Image (cartoon, rainbow, N blue to C red):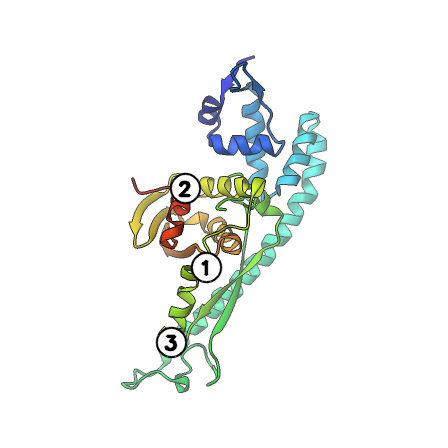
């Protein structure tokens, strides 16, 4: 049986070495050791990783993938099919709910834009009488929130995991997390919202496996990104079809590492993700998202 070092398996499978180590710690992948302590893998590891990747892109959670791999190893295709069907059905139901929520959110944005276009161009300052935020907005409205649930399969460890910068395989198991999009009525309120990440403590609530998992998820999610420096951070340009995964990870990341500031811009086929952090967190930002060098 052919033996491969971890770097060779990473090249053959397209799965980063950091993810391979994480899979091993999670019990999804096993390795022999040389007398010097180097990991060695057989040819079967390539097939196993392909199976894990397929399950990951269905949005399955880390625990579910572990269970499914056990069924797959038994070798009976019918058993894999029987085990997989209810899992896919559950993911499909969740995706349909998210699609309906996003469709409703899209309609609300279209309505807000149409209302904005219909407003007269007054020379005076905007005030509550403008109804600027949305049709019928009252004078006491401080903001309007549109909730869009974002989640779904993603890149490494794939859809489903959660970890700091990270979370790959478990993300699929999580319920869709709502993301509040707040339209502020004034610059002052917008400024206060934008400054929260600057004053948050540079510390992450994740540790151990959770930290490794989230890191692996981020690294796979932004794999191949074009990077450019921006003030206090960097901008990553990715294919627009990664929006769901990126938004899910960003929302999860701010729960454990609130010192990161995420901004997403869609530009045709491109997704631009800007990530910023206070000076004390710049090393963590580079470690998680890479640098422009």
In the image, 117: left or right of 165?
A: left
Which type of secondary structure does the marked residue at label 1 adopt? loop
Number of marks drawn:
3
Q: Could you tell me how far apart the alpha carbons at marks 2 and 1 are, in whole angstroms?
A: 19 Å
Q: Contact, CB < 8 Å: mark 1 with mark 3?
A: no
Q: Residue at x 50, y 39 (%)?
A: 216
Q: Which mark is residue 186?
A: 3
Badge 3: residue crowd in 10 Å (few <14, some 14–19, many ≥20) = few
Residue pictured at 47% horizontal, 78% vertical = 142
Where residue 231 sits, quadrant-wise, is bottom left
Give neighbour class at mark 1: few <14, some 14-19, many 20+ (Cα, 10 Å).
some
Front one among 17 and 198: 198
The residue that label 1 is drawn on is: 200
Coordinates of residue 288 in the picture (x, y in percent) = 43, 43
Please tell me the numbered disc located at residue 119: none
Q: Which residue is mark 2?
A: 287
Q: Earlier in the sequence, mark 2 or mark 1?
A: 1
Q: Mark 3 against mark 2, which lies toward the viewer? A: 2
Rendered image quadrant of residue 46: top right
- Whole-angstrom CA distance, mark 1 to mark 3, is 23 Å
Q: Residue at x 54, y 52 (%)?
A: 151
Q: What element does badge 3 sit on?
A: loop
The answer to which of marks 3 and 2 sits earlier in the sequence is 3
- Of labels 1 and 3, earlier in sequence is 3
The quarter of the rendered structure image containing the C terminus is top left
CB within 8 Å, label 2 to label 1: no
């Amino acid at each position: 049986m052919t033996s491969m070092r971890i770097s060779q398996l990473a090249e053959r499978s397209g799965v980063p070495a950091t993810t391979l180590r994480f899979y091993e710690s999670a019990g999804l992948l096993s390795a022999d050791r040389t007398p010097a302590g180097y990991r060695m893998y057989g040819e079967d590891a390539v097939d196993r990783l392909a199976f894990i990747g397929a399950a990951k892109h269905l949005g399955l959670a880390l625990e579910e993938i572990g269970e499914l791999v056990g069924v797959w190893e038994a070798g009976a295709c019918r058993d894999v099919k029987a085990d997989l069907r209810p899992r896919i059905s559950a993911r499909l139901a969740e995706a349909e709910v998210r699609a309906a929520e996003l469709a409703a959110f899209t309609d609300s944005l279209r309505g807000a834009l149409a209302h904005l276009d219909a407003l007269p161009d007054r020379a005076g300052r905007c005030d509550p009488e403008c109804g600027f935020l949305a049709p019928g907005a009252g004078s006491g409205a401080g903001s309007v929130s549109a909730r869009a649930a974002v989640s779904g399969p993603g890149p490494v460890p794939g859809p489903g995991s959660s970890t700091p910068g990270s979370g790959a395989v478990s993300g699929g198991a999580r319920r869709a997390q709502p993301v509040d999009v707040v339209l502020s009525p004034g610059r002052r309120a917008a400024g206060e919202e934008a400054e929260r990440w600057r004053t948050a403590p540079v510390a992450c609530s994740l540790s151990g496996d959770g930290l490794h998992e989230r890191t692996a998820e981020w690294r796979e999610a932004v794999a191949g990104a074009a990077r450019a420096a921006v003030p206090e951070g960097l901008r990553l340009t990715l294919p627009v079809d990664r929006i769901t995964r990126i938004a899910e990870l960003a929302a999860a990341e701010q729960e454990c590492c609130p010192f990161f500031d995420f901004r997403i811009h869609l530009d045709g086929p491109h997704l631009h993700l800007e990530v910023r952090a206070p000076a004390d967190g710049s090393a963590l930002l580079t470690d998680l998202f890479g640098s422009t060098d």
